Amino acid sequence: MVYSLAASTLTLAAPVGCDTSSAEGVEPTAAEAHGPSRVLVTGADEEMLVLEVTAANKVVVRLPRVEVGQGITTAVAMMIAEELDARLVDVDIPLAEARTKGNQYTGGSSSVRSLYGPARALAATARARLVTAAARRWHLPARSLRTRDTMVVAPDGRTATFGSLTTAAARIHRPAVSSKPKPASEHKVIGRPTGRIDARDIVTGKAKYAGDLEVAGAKPTVVARPPTLGGRLVSVDDRAARAMPGVHAVVKVAGGVAVVAESFHHAFKARDALRITWRPGPLASLSDAAIRSRLRAAVPSVGAPPRGSAQVEGEFEFAFVSHAPMEVLTAVADVRADRAEIWFSSQTPMDARESIASAIGLPKSKVRVHVVRGGGSFGRRLNYDAAIEAALISKAARRPVKLMWSRGDDIRHGRMRGASHHRIRASHARGRVVAFSHAMASVSESYERQGLAVQGGVTVQGGVSTVAAGPLPSDSGLYNFGRVSGSSGSVELAMPLGAWRSVDSGTMRTAEEIIVDEVAAELGKDPVAFRRGTLRNKSVKAVLDKVAAAGHWGRILPSGQAQGVAVHEEYGSCVACLVEIDATDPKNPRVTKVVMAADVGTAVNPRGLEAQLMGTAVDGISTVLRAGLHIDRGAVREGSFADFRYARQQHSPLRFEAHILPSRREPGGAGELGVPAAAGAVANAYARATRTKPRRFPINF
């Protein structure tokens, strides 16, 4: 029996044994497909979570998000275990398939925030029904019963597992006990540092990614791609490739030429045997210097400063950056004449399903998208270009395929963070900042590889256009800096761009925190003391105070070494970061210590949050000091981790500390929160250690 949850009211949605796939756009469970449903509760809110208790006493909640290493499955399992009084080991969180409606978006540091209320309410409702079912079985007052370890316990010691009560609980319309979630003061699971529920599966290889799937008949597939961005196929001689052992098919696709073979070894060998003539892409005449020049010209004016004020100014350049998840893009596709089935890791599976259906010419109802865990994302899996490509190859080859983008494919043709140029001016008078202006321009994608698109009223074809300036979504209001203003422009380029972890904040806040340090120096004030005196939010001051104390701000360091600090506020959360760097050799700096403090409201899993902050610290170290992409005559120069120099173990801090400030507020966002503060702190530490003013990032590029 399925129940829909709306606020605190439950209403019957489907009778026992009925197919629930049409109920709120949720697909049927395995149990429903083979017998009576063991689904206790279905949320009728946007999340539409489904809670099922199996006969084996497993609590199963199908998650409308994707696990890409951020630990969301563990966090949701903790929410469910908390409200059900279930053992965490008894809670399974499989990923839901693409649905017809609801919220399946994973991004914007929103997952815990959006699921915290619905998941707890769902589990609390299920618990009330299970307790009521046990009370009726034992003829005892429901309020005399307790729950623990995935079972109901009577005062005399009798126990009943949740699994044994499921059928009876499903018949209950009005539970005899409260179905409200627990107050925070009673939490025993939420807020406790917890290891990931899938950690053992990951390290033992049991966890399955798209590349691990065994789909009947799906053969390894790779694509030969053009040397330049947006290059076009002119001709191909595939005779040698087709004659090679293990080759099943060679087909032309929009991005190049695909080879389907018995193994990836056979596929790569055959791909390299193709003789292809390419037409250069539309950016073949452009390289880094020209792109930087266009960006600089596209930055709007910051206007006139207030009369009688002195100025601290800076211009900052940020390079393109690849997402480079450890698991390269992989998708399995089985496209038939009347239906299609796709397996891949997607942050936007509902949009992906619609786009795939359109690309292969099938109704959306005939396309099934299985969401698979991903080995990293950082925003990359918001886009589903690999899945569309796999579907088109499967259709053309008339067989199932397992498409893998190589590391070179991913870096040279995948999505990337756009380059940007920033112009900032802080005006100060009588010892305080009276105006703060931040203008910037970024590269944005004007059109896909078809070569034509219309964005923002500007039509671009085969070239470059600069669009008019607009308001800048700056969060400079973090400080009491008087009149704060911002504006933005963009340079439209035919490049595959995508949201990169922390999106605009990662560059904007970094540049702003550098200027904050320089203003403090101009006014003869300590950077931490200056921030404390100008920050608006008490919570931001608290995390700043925490890192300053824990990191021993101001301690004397040898020549060539220094500390740096930065703060950030976003997603209803705030963070501070203190960094120590050894830049005795400015060309090979090493961050030796990172101390971070965060206030994210209720931290469902502090251990998971610490891991997220550690990851953002590495992102800050990488993008400020080492890692970026060069554009050479329309082509991405880098092609592997050998030249896309993301931080490795030898570049990671020798010491890392994360301090989670206690709070009983609703959870804020955390996954992207730390990037801007970490990047700003690294830049400021480098500046103090080298007594320079870094303006171009990464610094060693």
Image: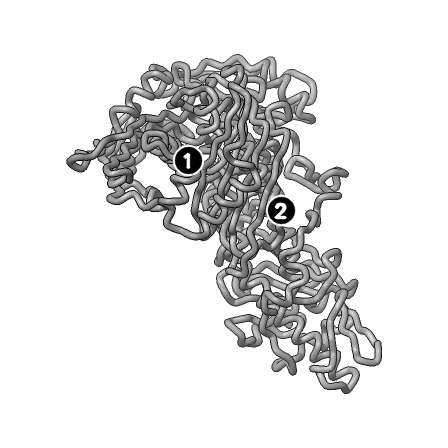
Quarter occupied by the N terminus: bottom right
- State if disc 1 and disc 2 touch (CB < 8 Å): no
Residue for badge 2: 608
* Way the structure is coloured: one colour
The disc, 2 or 1, on the residue closer to the chain's N-terminal end is 1
Q: Amino acid at mark 2?
A: Gly
> Seen in the image, is 52 located left or right of residue 329?
right
Q: Position of residue 161 (x, y in %)?
A: 78, 69
Task: Name the mark on residue 527.
Answer: 1
Q: Above or below — where is 654 with respect to 193?
A: above
Residue 42, given in percent of the width and then of the height, sits at 58, 67
Count of labels in the image: 2
Q: In this orientation, which residue lies closer to the viewer: 155 or 250?
A: 155
Q: Secondary structure at mark 2?
A: helix
Q: Nearer the viewer, mark 2 or mark 1?
A: 1
Question: Can residue 67 be seen in the rendering of this structure?
Answer: no
The image shows residue 291 at horizontal and vertical percentages of 33, 21
**In the image, is residue 27 above or below residue 468?**
below
Report how far apart the C-alphas of labels 2 and 1 lie in the structure. 30 Å
Task: Give coordinates of residue 74: x percent, y percent.
Answer: 65, 51
Query: Quadrant of residue 178 in the image?
Result: bottom right
Dividing the picture into quadrants, the one containing residue 515 is top left
